[in-house]
Amino acid sequence: MPEPPVLATNSVGRRGRRARGDARTEGRKQGTGLSGLGVMGGRYTPLSDTQLTQIDAAARHVLSTVGMSEVPDFVAETICRRGGNYVDGRLTFSPDLVQEALAGFQRNFTLHGQDSNHDLVMSGNRVHVGSGGAAPMVMDLDTGRYRKSLLKDLYDAARLVDALEHIHFFSRSLVARDMDTPELLDVNTAYACLMGTRKHVFTSASTPENVQLIADMCYAIAGSEQAFRDRPFLSLNVNHVVSPLRFAEEACGVMREAARLGIPIHANSFGQLGASTPVTIAGTVMQITAETLAGMIFAWCVNPDAKITFGPRPMVTDLRTGAMSGGGGEQALLMAATTQMAHYYDLPNTCIAGAADSKTADAQSGYEKALSITLAAQAGSNAITQSCGMQASLMGCAFESYVIDNDMLGSILRSLAPIDVTPETISTELVRDTVTGDGHYLGHADTLERMESDFLYPRIADRRGIAEWEADGSLDIREIARRETRAILGRHFPNHISAEIDAYLRGHFDIRLPKENMEAS
């Protein structure tokens, strides 16, 4: 491919827990604000140190004695060169290889935005929240009914997320079902996401061959291959496992190419509790840990400098129907527990939370999302995907849900803020002066000062009195969110990528997103 034009646009385990330090002090050092990037979680720990050690030992035992099946030849060859053993169709990992990889994985790296204000620091207990889901359907903003999702919808979702302050990254939330080949799908998905937001983009590739195309697009936007390798603003979700304990050949090929080309990798393992993983939470966490590590070890063997996140993503099966369910308390516990395993290994990590079973942005959706996202955030997940916009157990996406969930995420992130306890904040003198004076604090200088610094106010949630709400039409939050969504989509068209770079991309790739869809009408 010809050179693009220059971009003109604007001992593993306990060691990890010791290294993270005091979350409250670190949060103050970061200066991230009430709900900004990288607020600190890590206070919720459903597993004890002893239980973490037990699960780790069991996962290592499974890797060394049970191993993986359906192993592509290139995976077996790569692992066996480093201490694996391939016998009777199963690939096992020696204890020394597992330990060497755990010690060698890259840590404390950054997933960059195209704008540095949106960089994600993937370390310790820093928490970031974003979209995700790859849903095949979208709720039409005008009709309120689900229809198949299109490329324009994906671009609209990206620019909506770009405008919402408490959503930190954009992971592909919709499948562009009007793209009729894997190459068209992957190239146009990457293009729509990268053009739609300055925030870091998570996407995926259908085939290993398409990873090179995505890389070439990123290199062009960055200005060079090295510029992208230095500040990668796109990463790939790779679901390298078919539970239980089977490799997925195409996905492993994608993982190999991403590692080779400098694209960060999210090594994700999906399983369903009670169906493709054990019916117990502990058994599921153990199996999913082993599966995730198997993929990470392979990518590390390909390129020891690869940026790989630990992405265990078990889901719950509703055992009455066999269907996936993402909205219950069990799901929330799973995400917190797998996040703890990541911290046990001191690994950059991602998880799923917010995969509500509700079909629309109603009360069920709200409590399902708030529960799972809060526990994942309090556990300290570095990147919580599917935390906004998703409905119907990841089968559908609703634009107004992004706007509602943005308010919810702000509140959840605010709850992570440390409580500042000092003589000034305990305020004994202020209490004495107030009770002997005016009898209230509303007019005090400290109250007025902290009104703006210590409180996060919602974007659309209604805190007015009943009479005012009724006089204004008694609207529920969904209608308010639809109005806000239409307003954002009508005015917010990101232009962080220059017209020259866009012309280059359109000249070298089969881009199917019409330019008129990317401009205000």
Image: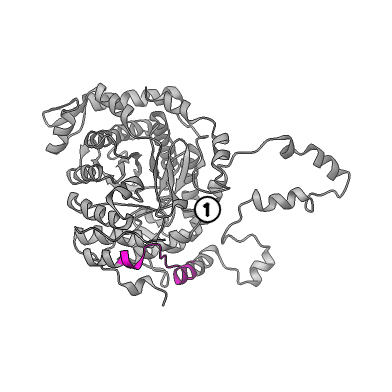
In the rendering, at what x and y percent does residue 343 appear? Answer: 42, 32
| Element on which disc 1 rests | helix
- Image quadrant in which you'd find residue 308: top left
Q: Position of residue 398 (x, y in %)?
A: 41, 62
Q: Is residue 150 left or right of residue 490?
A: left
User: Which region shows up in magenta?
Assistant: 485-502
Q: Residue at x 40, y 56 (%)?
A: 391
Magenta-drawn stretch contains 490 = yes
Q: Nearer the viewer, residue 7 or 163?
A: 7
Locate residue 160, reporting x and y percent. Answer: 44, 62
- Whether residue 54 is in magenta: the answer is no
Pick the residue in front: 244 or 249: 249
Secondary structure character of the magenta stretch overall: helix
Please tell me in which quadrant of the rendered image residue 271 appears. top left
Amino acid type assigned to the residue bearing label 1 in the image: Met
In the rendered view of the protein, which quadrant contains the C terminus?
A: bottom left
Is residue 12 in view from this perspective? yes
Give residue 6's position: percent from left, percent from top: 31, 59
Answer yes or no: is residue 150 visible.
no
Quarter holding residue 253: top left
In the image, is 18 to the left or to the right of 215?
A: right
Q: Nearer the viewer, residue 132 or 34?
A: 34
Tag 1 residue: 408
Q: Is residue 106 above or below residue 445?
A: above
Count numbered badges in the picture: 1
